[in-house]
Image: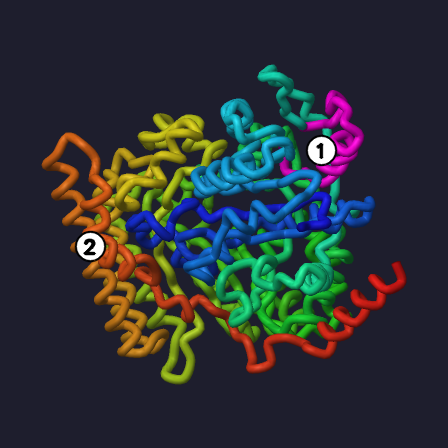
């Protein structure tokens, strides 16, 4: 039995992925999680800590990780044995459309009277459709669910009506009520990003696996921090853009975290973990004063972890010098999207290759440890020929900025998959940006996730590339980029050979599925899918790159065990005091 007031459940992208043979393709190769997208949103942590401050106990259970780590893990038994005041399930990324709703259905099977609450950007976008699913009782809209969720728990506890809970969609006897979207905090200063509390929670519930951010986190303890909610940029396919936040969350401008608090967050993390810390978003987005204050505070912290910073635009040498003066070990992540400046501009990033090269050169001269460059397939005005030219550009960068002893440039290319983000400019006005959509509703996306291959799950194609061309170009580009990485020593010859084999198998399997699909009127049956299952499993991940290649430096000592032990002792003593 659980003594938690709220249990936050994170689902796999597809609930019964252990039984369904699906060719996921390279949809998650450039993020830490697997194609099951087992990484839960940062909001889980801030919700848990906010509610704890207000007297509620919260437990996080990463159901996806538990299912990945143990093929025999009994999800139904887990759910049946829980007994909270309410369950919370995230539908932040649309890729969880299937898993979240199926998990909610399971919750209702064993706890028909316990409220099920949904939240996240995708839940907020599709709230009208989502609330009509019988397994959903409440939806909290917007990008800040902490306070509304606290008020909702109070109402549930009292057995009262939630008429005054902001941002809430709810139903009573089948009648749906939409409360006004009025809770829009202007900053994130009241929230806590205390990863130490997550350690304490995992020890308290004796459930380290349930709190893991993703499957291999113990081997690669990377930690992320969020300086704000919202965005000042409008990349046309992004569901977290300024337009998307305005439409979905009613937010006209980002809610920033005080730069001093952000620096404290970094220092706090470094007490417990020695892995890399990534700060999501470009610090300059909040203004030059914000950036200067943050780096000034960081200079005082003496943090030795590798810290990854994003650049949405090229950076001046002065800015890079400020970073170098404040952070011992810094890495950069830049997403030029394409080598073609016209395509890049059409996507929403308007800068020249010359400026990009200057940024790379200055950063390396100042001691930047590595620079990750991300290119995308599925962009406006992009053709298969343009994708090939992007790989040639990657070779140019590797040759220009590498030497025999060090290769600091790590280029990646991946498809925009599986979905074009709802709320993005391209999703809302596809014709205007040269896109064609195949799925619009939540239910259509839920169904698409069960397609036999990722080609048929894609919810879009463009005027310049069909779905088939996007898939083929992805495999061809990754094959050539894999060859270049072997040539320049980013991966070993053996690793390159293994990746090349998976690419070939994936392309052959794609063509095999296409042949079956094109020569029949009905979708593949279960027996036909089962016959392909072994091939699916062999091509499920690490197609675009070796997963270890994505990892920044982590020493042999990944955790500060003394600090973690002290946390555990404090937790035990506090329980005795109560």
Nearest-to-viewer mark from 2 and 1? 2
Please give the name of the residue rendered at 37% of the width and 30% of the height, measured from the top-left corner: 444
Q: Is residue 69 toward the left or the right of residue 62 in the image?
A: left
Q: Is residue 439 visible?
A: yes
24 or 183, which lies in front?
Answer: 24
Identify the residue at the far bottom of this view: 405
The location of residue 501, given as percent across then percent down, is 21, 66
Give the percent coordinates (x, y) of residue 120. 58, 38
Please give the range of residues in magenta. Answer: 141-167
Number of residues whose C-alpha sits closer than 10 Å to that of mark 1, classed few (under 14), some (14–19) or many (20 or more): some
Q: For the C terminus, which image quadrant?
A: bottom right
Q: How many C-alpha atoms fall within 10 Å of the one at disc 2: few (<14), some, or many (≥20)?
A: some
Quarter of the view holding residue 252: top right
Relative to 106, residue 175 above or below: above
User: Which residue: 76% across, 56% down?
Assistant: 261
Is 552 part of what is drawn in magenta? no
Does 246 sit left or right of 27 as displayed?
A: right
Residue at the extreme right: 577
Distance CA(mark 2)–CA(mark 1):
47 Å
Residue highlighted by disc 1: 184
- Taking the image as drawn, is residue 316 in sight? no
Question: On the image, which quarter does residue 194 sit in?
Answer: bottom right
Residue 104 spot, x, y in % from top left: 53, 37
**Could you tell me which residue is drawn at 44 percent across and 66 percent down?**
550
Residue that badge 2 annotates: 507
Near-viewer residue (185 or 44)? 44
């Amino acid at each position: 039995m659980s003594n938690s007031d709220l249990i936050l459940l994170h689902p796999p992208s597809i609930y019964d992925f252990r039984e369904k043979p699906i060719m996921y393709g390279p949809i998650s190769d450039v993020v830490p999680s697997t194609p099951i997208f087992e990484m839960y949103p940062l909001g889980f942590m801030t919700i848990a800590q906010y509610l704890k401050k207000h007297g509620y106990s919260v437990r996080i259970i990463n159901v996806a990780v538990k299912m990945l780590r143990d093929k025999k893990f009994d999800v139904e038994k887990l759910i049946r044995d829980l007994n909270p005041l309410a369950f919370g399930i995230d539908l932040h990324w649309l890729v969880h459309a299937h898993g979240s709703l199926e998990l909610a259905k399971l919750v209702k099977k064993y706890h028909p009277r316990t409220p099920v609450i949904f939240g996240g950007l995708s839940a907020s976008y599709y709230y009208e459709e989502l609330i009509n699913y019988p397994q959903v009782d409440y939806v909290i809209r917007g990008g800040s669910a902490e306070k509304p969720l606290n008020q909702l728990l109070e109402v549930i506890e009292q057995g009262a009506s939630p008429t005054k809970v902001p941002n809430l969609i709810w139903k009573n006897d089948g009648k749906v009520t939409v409360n006004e979207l009025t809770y829009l905090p202007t900053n994130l200063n009241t929230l806590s990003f205390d990863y130490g509390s997550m350690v304490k929670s995992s020890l308290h519930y004796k459930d380290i696996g349930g709190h893991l951010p993703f499957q291999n986190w113990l081997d690669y303890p990377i930690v992320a921090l969020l300086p704000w909610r919202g965005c000042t940029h409008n990349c046309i396919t992004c569901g977290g853009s300024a337009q998307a936040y305005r439409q979905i969350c009613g937010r006209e401008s980002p809610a920033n975290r005080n730069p001093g608090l952000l620096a404290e967050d970094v220092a706090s993390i470094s007490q417990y973990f020695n892995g890399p810390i990534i700060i999501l978003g470009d610090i300059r987005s909040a203004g030059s004063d914000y950036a200067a204050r943050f780096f000034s505070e960081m200079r005082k912290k003496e943090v030795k972890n590798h810290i990854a910073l994003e650049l949405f635009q090229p950076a001046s040498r002065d800015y890079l010098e400020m970073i170098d003066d404040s952070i011992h070990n810094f890495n950069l992540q830049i997403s030029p999207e394409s080598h073609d400046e016209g395509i890049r501009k059409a996507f929403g990033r308007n800068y020249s290759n010359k400026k990009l090269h200057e940024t790379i050169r200055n950063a390396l001269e100042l001691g930047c440890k590595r620079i990750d460059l991300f290119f995308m397939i599925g962009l406006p005005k992009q053709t298969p020929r343009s994708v090939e030219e992007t790989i040639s550009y990657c070779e140019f960068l590797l040759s220009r900025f590498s030497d025999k002893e060090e290769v600091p440039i790590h280029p990646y290319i991946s498809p925009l998959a599986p979905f074009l983000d709802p709320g993005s400019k391209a999703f809302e006005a596809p014709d205007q940006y040269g896109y064609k959509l195949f799925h619009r509703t939540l239910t259509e996306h839920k169904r698409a996730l069960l397609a036999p291959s990722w080609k048929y799950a894609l919810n879009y194609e463009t005027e310049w590339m069909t779905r088939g061309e996007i898939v083929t170009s992805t495999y061809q580009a990754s094959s050539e980029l894999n060859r270049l990485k072997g040539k320049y020593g980013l991966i070993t010859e053996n690793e390159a050979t293994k990746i090349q084999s998976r690419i070939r198998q994936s392309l052959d399997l794609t063509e095999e599925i296409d042949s079956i699909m094109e020569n029949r009127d009905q979708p593949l049956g279960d027996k036909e899918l089962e016959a392909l299952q072994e091939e699916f499993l062999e091509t499920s991940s690490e197609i675009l790159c070796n997963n270890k290649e994505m990892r920044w430096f982590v020493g042999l000592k990944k955790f500060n065990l003394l600090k973690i032990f002290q946390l555990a002792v404090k937790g035990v003593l506090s329980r005795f005091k109560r």
